[in-house]
Image: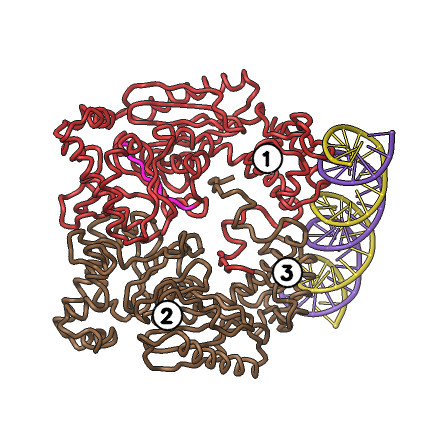
Chain colours: A red, B brown, C purple, D yellow
Amino acid sequence: MTTPLHEAHPSSPGRRLPDTQQGMRRRNLARVMHTVNAEGPLSRAAVASRIGLTRAAVSTLVDELIRSGLLEELGPERPGRVGRPGSSLAVSGRGPAGIGAEIGVDHLAVCAVDLRGTVRARVVRHGTNRGRPPQPVLAELTALVAQVVAEAEREGLWPAGLAVAVPGLVARDTRTVVRAPNLDWHEVDLGALLPADLPPTVDNEANFGSLAELWLGDDTPLDFLHVSAEIGIGGAVVVDGRLLRGTRGFAGELGHVPVHPEGPECACGGRGCLEQYAGEEAVLRAAGLTPGENRVEVLAERAAQGDKEVHRALRDAGTALGIALTGAVNLLDPQAVVLGGALAALAPWLLPSLELELARRSAGRACVVSVSRLGPEGPLLGAAHSVVRAVLDDPAAVAGRT
Amino acid sequence: MTTPLHEAHPSSPGRRLPDTQQGMRRRNLARVMHTVNAEGPLSRAAVASRIGLTRAAVSTLVDELIRSGLLEELGPERPGRVGRPGSSLAVSGRGPAGIGAEIGVDHLAVCAVDLRGTVRARVVRHGTNRGRPPQPVLAELTALVAQVVAEAEREGLWPAGLAVAVPGLVARDTRTVVRAPNLDWHEVDLGALLPADLPPTVDNEANFGSLAELWLGDDTPLDFLHVSAEIGIGGAVVVDGRLLRGTRGFAGELGHVPVHPEGPECACGGRGCLEQYAGEEAVLRAAGLTPGENRVEVLAERAAQGDKEVHRALRDAGTALGIALTGAVNLLDPQAVVLGGALAALAPWLLPSLELELARRSAGRACVVSVSRLGPEGPLLGAAHSVVRAVLDDPAAVAGRT
DNA sequence: CTATTTCGTCATGGCGCTTAACAAATTAGT
DNA sequence: ACTAATTTGTTAAGCGCCATGACGAAATAG
């Protein structure tokens, strides 16, 4: 017996499946899927030893998963060790697919990812969505989704769900966009405006970005703080491999953490919020550029060219981020802080001052700061993978539909 | 199907019991215990309908729990409705007991709590522990534990575990005190210095305080931020009914969140940390009192007498707390902020400025701030109850020993 | 070529919950 | 007062799921 980890009442949210034999079966199917997915091609015996069931039990589970088209038999392993070689099992590349979509300020994107995690279809449409009303944007998105689904179906895949990343706050129902300032959307029920044949899930792009980091990042820990920035500053908290959503679904909002309490007024009603120092608009202004005409890409470009003004602006932004992150790190004690989204491209100029500030203020207790490999791809991939994960988490739920 | 809550790999930490029939049985035993514990005396049929099993299945589970001495049959219900009245079941008041202990700066305390949550034995020893080395303090504590255990045994209880609350940072192993500044302890392995016959668990007093709030508070939500203060400022984060511990076990440390980044230097290496404005020493100084000679109690006393200096000092502390909490609330989006420990007694003078600052800086998104009913009792009760919860969480584990 | 090792499958069994039926204890209706 | 209806708790039979143990198959080691 180790550390007692106290949980909520076991019948409260958290335990999804009933504790009956059917529930047990479903959980074990999920464990087989997860194990095969995470550790590459594996024989039945290898799976059995990993999840603690017997070979016989795993055999029946695998049979069921193969019949459902979720697992594939790859044939005999290349024999290297003594004994009869096992038959390799892999997650199917022709079963269900996760459809991910992203509504960006300057683009729309849709992709399909198979259970193996491979992107099998992909469409991007450039053009600003700033100020466009929801209907035409979603109509355009729906057409792109149909296009990607058609392409995926030609490859033998079928869509298991649709997840949409948006640049704004999403309610806990994962359908309603409460506020997306850069699109000028308020209280929009995306669920009602998206194709009805696919169960849609909507979430913040920072949330999906952090999930992508968790699932796809190399060596990403199970406890980390993900900071991204598109226009505002988004953040997401992952604890023990689970995304922390908060009561209203707003957790992770780093942009309005007070940095200098008596600083300039912010649109949120506060003063000296992080966004006043490290938000896109503030940094562009500090670098002597006109917001609106320019975007983050310009900053990265000029910084690479050695523009001193830009360097100074980014250094100051890094300091402000460092102050805000000190608070967050004290509060959450994460294993790492990951810079993603647009911040990844600016990291070379942000990191030094950010790390300095963080280290100075937390005397040895500072945690690792790393940069996302995924960068701006995170939200889209995270969205698509969230559908894939839902299938892996409960394969029995999709086994019915072929 | 509602919101997909993505979890870590099911075979990773989080799933404690194996997904086999024995594990299922154990989890169902736990669900019966939790249900009876949470919803008062209940018939077998009522339990069955609540946890979704059949009456027959619940009957066998209850039989086993009664044989183990964890549940008691209270006799027939008072018949009010049509149909045969059920037989009331209640959690046993003569089975295992949780032993809680608290090492405070100015006192030691130990208590025993039965499965029903009633305090059945209790001892307090006053006298400062500031600067005393660990050995004599723990020897004294061990004697107090023996005394409480003896008293509990006279009432037909047997100790199921010991939990110790300490005013300092505890490593994730829940044995080692990494740093307790007010005791001047560093890297002390309490597990080795405590009675070996009882499995001991050590944790921060703020953590135990927040668990007490979660389990014993009236109407405490499942997501909240608990702020307490003894000498430093402690905090704890509860998410979805689970305590967030952080990578090193340091999560919740609110004391060194930057409030005024260019403020006075702090012992932690930073500048303008919350503790510089709302810590005991800072507040006493601001109120014109000498730290060391006075404690929080004096502040409450003088404030009640209408001392203007104290009022001003507490108002300013509330403002600083409000600034720090704005950041925390933005990051975590909790359902409530609960003021506990010594802060509860000072709440009348802290709250107005705290709530003003929080509301001003978060424009309608502010969350409820409430005051703990438990106050300074929290850590001790939380410790004892954590043992009780461990029994409820896995009754089969203790069923063996009588 | 034989012994050994490992894999996947099959038959058997145990465990835990469900189903269905029943006696017991109460209320509602005549 | 007596019957019908309702609800509880128990019992026996049944089924699903995993464990156990034995077996043939397919590789390596000597």
Magenta residues, start to end: A223-230
Classify residue A199 as left or right of residue B231: right
Answer yes or no: do the residues labelled 2 and 1 have beta carbons within 8 Å? no
- Amino acid carrying label 2: it is Leu
Residue drawn at x 33%, y 44% is: A252
Q: Quick check: is A225 in the magenta stretch?
A: yes
- Amino acid carrying label 1: it is Val
The residue that mark 1 highlights is A36
Classify residue B324 as left or right of residue D10: left
* Subunit ID for the residue under disc 2: B
Q: Nearer the viewer, mark 3 or mark 2?
A: 2
The residue that mark 3 highlights is B45
Classify residue B367 as left or right of residue A117: left
Q: Nearer the viewer, mark 1 or mark 3?
A: 1
Q: Secondary structure at mark 2?
A: loop
Circles 3 and 2 on the same subunit? yes
Q: Quadrant of residue B298?
A: bottom left
Circles 2 and 1 on the same subunit? no
The residue that mark 2 highlights is B374
Q: Quadrant of the C terminus of chain B?
A: bottom right
* Subunit ID for the residue under disc 1: A
- Amino acid carrying label 3: it is Ala
Vertical arrangement, residue A239 with respect to residue C3, above or below: below
